[in-house]
Amino acid sequence: MRGADILVEMLIGYGVDTIFGVPGDTNVPFYEALQLRADEIRHVMARDERSAGFMADAYGRFTNRPGVFECPSGAGAMYSLPPVAESNGSSVPVILLTIDIPLPGEGRGVLTELDCAKLFEPVTKLSVQVKSPEKLPEIIRRAFRAACSGKPGAVHLQIPEDMLLAEVDPARISLHVEEECRTFPAYPTLPPETKLTRLLELIARAERPLIIAGGGVNRADAGDVITGFAERHDIPICTTMTGQGSIPDDHRLAIGVIGDNGYHPHANLALEKSDLAIFVGSRIGSVVTIGWTFPQVTLNRRLVQIDISPEVMANNYENLLSVQGDAKLVFQRLLQMETDTNPARRSGWVDELNADRARFWESAAPLLTDERVPLRPERAVHAFNRALEASGRPALIYSDAGTPTPYMTRFLKINDRETRFAIPRAFGGLGSALPATVGAWAADPAKRPIGLFGDGSFGMSVGELETLVRLQVPAILILFNNGTYGWIKGLHRLKGHNQCFGVDFLPPEGQAIAEAFGLKAWTARTGAELDEALALAFAWKTGPCFIDLRIESLAERVPPVYSWLRRRGEDPMALESTDHGYR
């Protein structure tokens, strides 16, 4: 049995149905083995290793099964670094296989030689080189265990080509898999009962408790159970940017997004006013706390942190209580415990926050229907909300950093449990959303994959349009087109540099480019054109489609970013929505 056959057998055993990658000199033996099992495991060829990684990232985000991708040696490994770092920083289970030069060539100047195991060490949970073909099954088991247990993350395996060509006696190895490690969370844990009893006591005494759901809630698929707990105790819920979707946006207890980028002022006010802040699945990092300057009333001694990783506990604040455990198990157990917290006494707290929320949305209404040109992002998101709801189908939405982020985070409304929204926020790199739609489609073909990206991102991953057409992925792609790196240009203007340098480029002819690759495409310059294009896109059934949306740049008005507004001397907590210029 060849090493390549062992590798494919183990991947199939762990339930891997799709692997993303790019062909190269060294991975030919792996492709031969994959071809023999093509009816059991699908290989999706990407046009760039970075894109393959973002496909695997989206697959991991939307399934909680490890996304697997592969690349050849040398440059292929270097191109794979950005998505692996993003997946690991975002706690997404991903496994990268770099098929490397044969071991005998190490240190002898072989073309593409690179110490990949060391290269990926800083940005993975585990990065190892396979040095014996007999060790392949053991190392594959270790990879899935590391990716899926504890806080999930990325794993890298450097597999020399000769390990895949070697013949192995099946009697000397075991091809068993750990069933628990096929998905995250593997081996989920519960804290001691005394911790949960203490938490319920704190909630019983609190007049203004608040749950803040982070990205770990989505990763643990804990939204439903946390919503159920909040309903029982009448506790409002805010989310971080990556926690969006933990609770339907139209729920009475869903207050909004806290933090800096695309925040809701009424959500930030809720955190400011709360007397017990229960963070779940959040590192409580710089974006959530606006560089640890918010809330202005310190979280010390009123903060409960619930997280699967003990490493993040009390890292930034003095916790009143630290609860280590899987979010879903923790709240399932809390719901089973007998409590008497008299939740009715909190109705005034919830009503106050909902009054703030209603005031915000009433004030935002004119922005959402503003028809001026170039089209404003608020109007674009409003159109998207209506088209998504009218479609009647759940979607998997993946947004790049840049123009879509602050406005989508603030104005997007997700009112069903099946639709998911993801933004890669660990490193905020560009170029992920377009290829991510391929991973989203592989994760769940029953849901519409949607990619939102600026023209800066588009230029970095445009080649994957061919992949979408080749595979006939029914993706809806929306290009936010304004001919600039808007976020960076906005920063220039925020600092008083109105003669911005090195941020502008020619806006792409998005429709023409998409049509050249074989996509159905439209251009939208006005609100009416966007409404029509979105209706046609959601009705389109034959492969991918593309909307070239000519949109206002972030550099024209200060976007809804707390720290930016504060720097301009504005009140970022104001519930009234008004335009703010850079001068």
Image: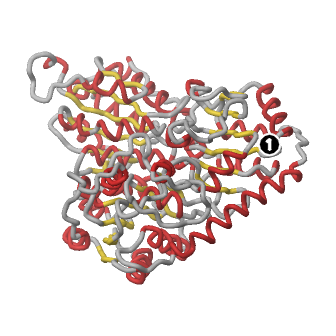
* Disc 1 crowd, CA 10 A, few/some/many (<14, 14-19, 20+): some
344 versus 413 height, above or below:
above
The one of 371 and 242 positioned closer to us in this rendering: 371
Estimate the x, y position of residue 166 in percent, counting from the top left: 23, 24
Q: How is the image coloured?
A: secondary structure
Name the image quarter holding residue 390: bottom right
306 left or right, relative to 345: left
Q: Quadrant location of the C terminus?
A: bottom left
Query: Which residue is drawn at the image coordinates 50% and 50% (left, top)?
Result: 566
Label 1 element class = helix
Quickly name the residue at label 1: 335
Instruction: Confirm whether residue 155 shows in the render.
Output: yes
Estimate the x, y position of residue 398 in percent, counting from the top left: 43, 56
Q: Quadrant location of the N terminus?
A: top left
Instruction: Confirm whether residue 190 shows in the render.
Output: no
Query: Which residue is drawn at the image coordinates 62% and 68% (left, top)?
Result: 361
Estimate the x, y position of residue 300 in percent, counting from the top left: 67, 30
43 left or right, relative to 389: left
134 versus 486 height, above or below:
above
Q: Amino acid at mark 1?
A: Leu
The one of 31 and 410 positioned closer to us in this rendering: 410
The one of 297 and 465 positioned closer to us in this rendering: 297
> How many numbered tags mark residues here?
1
Query: Which residue is drawn at the image coordinates 34% and 45% (left, top)?
Result: 429
539 left or right, relative to 385: left
The one of 4 and 573 positioned closer to us in this rendering: 573
Estimate the x, y position of residue 225 in percent, counting from the top left: 71, 47
